[in-house]
Image (cartoon, rainbow, N blue to C red):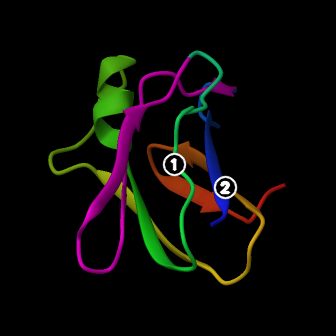
Amino acid sequence: MSSLSTHVLDTAHGCPAEGVALVLTDPSGREWFSGVTNEDGRCPGVPPCPLGRYRLSFAVADYFREKGVALSEPPFLDVVNIDFGIAAEGHYHVPLLVSPYSYSTYRGS
């Protein structure tokens, strides 16, 4: 089993993204975890995961609307899905840097 963490940063406002709903699933669609980011943009409590493929889905349009950002309908980014693999035992950190019109991610530490 490997530990997994995530961190969402709002690059449009230059702050951690508090209140982003997220879901962790496997390729079959089985939900492993769901939660909401805290004031630091982190979501504690993600359970350990066995080796395999996963998807983290972040509800970013809902977050930006809650912050008062006017978005088109449909929004350019609604839900950001990050598909990734856990290939070895250890810690995996999947940060998301997001604005209403862009996002990036990487394997953090």
Can residue 96 be seen here? The reply is yes
Mark on residue 37? none
Q: Is residue 33 magenta?
A: yes
Horizontal placement of 108 versus 64: left or right? right
Q: Which residue is mark 1?
A: 47
For image coordinates 30% across by 26% down, the residue present is 65
For image coordinates 55% across by 28% down, the residue present is 17
Q: Is residue 76 magenta?
A: no
Q: Which residue is mark 2?
A: 3
Amino acid at dot 2: Ser
Task: Quarter of the image for the C terminus: give it.
Answer: bottom right
Q: Position of residue 70 (x, y in %)?
A: 30, 28
Label 1's element? Answer: loop
Q: Position of residue 75 (x, y in %)?
A: 25, 49
Question: Badge 1: how crowded within 10 Å, few (<14), some, or many (20+)?
Answer: some
Question: Badge 2: how crowded within 10 Å, few (<14), some, or many (20+)?
Answer: some
In the depicted view, which residue is nearer to us: 87 or 78? 87
Q: Position of residue 1 (x, y in %)?
A: 63, 66
Can residue 77 be seen here? The reply is no
Q: Give above or below for 71 relative to 53.
A: above
Horizontal placement of 19 versus 62: left or right? right
Q: Position of residue 79 (x, y in %)?
A: 32, 53
Q: Quadrant of residue 49?
A: bottom right
Q: Give above or below for 29 relative to 14.
A: below
In the depicted view, which residue is nearer to us: 86 or 74? 86
In the depicted view, which residue is nearer to us: 85 or 15? 85
Comes first in the chain, label 2 or label 1: 2
Q: Which residues are magenta?
A: 15-38
For image coordinates 23% across by 71% down, the residue present is 29
Q: Give above or below for 69 relative to 101.
A: above
Label 2's element? Answer: strand
